[in-house]
Image (tube, rainbow, N blue to C red):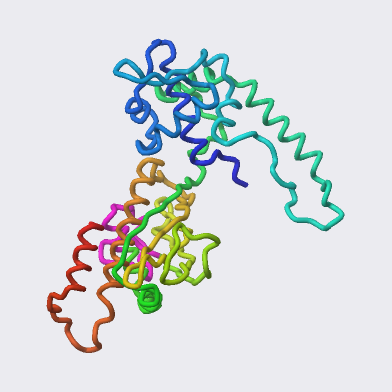
Amino acid sequence: MNMTLSKRGDYVMRAAISLARAFADDSPRKIREVVADTEVPTTFASQILADLVRAGLAVSKAGREGGYRLSRPPAEISVLEVVEAAEGPLRSERCALGDGPCRWEAVCPLHETWSEATVALRALLSQTSLAEVAERDVAIEAGTYSVPADAHRSHPISIDVADMVQVELGLAAVHAGLARLQPVLSAAAAAAAEEAGMPAGDGHRGGGTRENGSPVLEVTLAPAGQPERKARPSPSGQAANYMLGWQIGLPPAASRLEAELSVVPLDAERSELRIEGTWRQLPGKGDPLGRTDLERAARATIRAFLRRLARALEDGPAPEHTPRRAAPVTAASARRSTAVARRT
């Protein structure tokens, strides 16, 4: 069961802790300083800080001497206020048991228990001040914090990954190409992992292994139908989804990807490949990657895989038993080269 904050909630909490640690200095924090403290992506930092301002937890001031600071001392701000600034009111939006029989329309057998649990969580978060959390953050940074027995360092790390790339092919051609490339996807994923510096585990060689590369224990790519919504209207047909998955390496460096590969037509001759999903580090003995290193390697692997996939799709099938020769430069091939250059 996922008991973590959303990505936005994570960023808002980090930003609030950064402002709490700087509150005693009585000087506003610049966006770049918050980004340096928290590793919140620069493109999102202003939106994240705006959440705190809208909730009345922070104030902003423009100009050279401006920046962001808490609207009141961190000891007077609860963790609940920060969480709700990002996530909205902390309460159950639906029945704990989901869709049940019609007789449960008003209430389900878990209703009272779930409501009491929600009240208890709200009470705990409201009794914990932002100052307490900031003090823990200082102690963790200094190495003086006593690590709890259930610390997440022993738990698998999950990272949200997303990336996209364009190909100079129409929707039907992309679908045909993906079917053709099924047998070599494991090798492509292994090469992408090697390029990104993803650890190779204990050296076990799987079906997608390259020499000196990371073992990939089979890539699965299965059609999943049309997405529930499209990011943009397309005159050349509906987008389509594939379920994409693979496992790289073995513990302690094993990771598993569970994602959706979307093919979105842009026009009759161009499509966009998008990967969105979760990269999970699998538990095992030894010293697994930390979150920062895993996040870097996972995103670099996804990027490298998309580039390789796009190039393979645009190159098309090689004639059987015939060495491939350099194709003459045409307007179409020039467009493809330009697209590849943009991706790289």
The residue at the point 55 percent across, 26 percent down is 55
- Considering only vertical position in the picture, is 219 above or below 130? below
Left or right position of 329 against 190? left
- Considering only vertical position in the picture, is 149 above or below 257? above
Q: Main secondary structure of the magenta part?
A: loop
- Residue 304 lies in what quarter of the image? bottom left
Question: Which x, y percent locates residue 308?
Answer: 29, 65
Question: Which x, y percent locates residue 18?
Answer: 43, 23
The residue lying furthest to the right in this view is 103
Q: Which residues are magenta?
A: 191-216
The residue lying furthest to the front in this view is 235
- Considering only vertical position in the picture, is 68 above or below 259? above
The residue at the point 45 percent across, 70 percent down is 221
Question: Which x, y percent locates residue 310?
Answer: 30, 67
- Total numbered labels: 0
Q: Is residue 199 magenta?
A: yes
Left or right position of 168 against 255? left
Question: Which x, y percent locates residue 237?
Answer: 45, 71
- Residue 195 lies in what quarter of the image? bottom left
Q: Nearer the viewer, residue 341 or 300?
A: 341
- Considering only vertical position in the picture, is 53 above or below 241? above
Viewport quadrant of the C terminus: bottom left
The residue at the point 42 percent across, 68 percent down is 235
Left or right position of 42 against 342? right
Q: Nearer the viewer, residue 282 or 336?
A: 336
The residue at the point 75 percent across, 55 percent down is 99
- Residue 41 lies in what quarter of the image? top left
Q: Is residue 244 magenta?
A: no
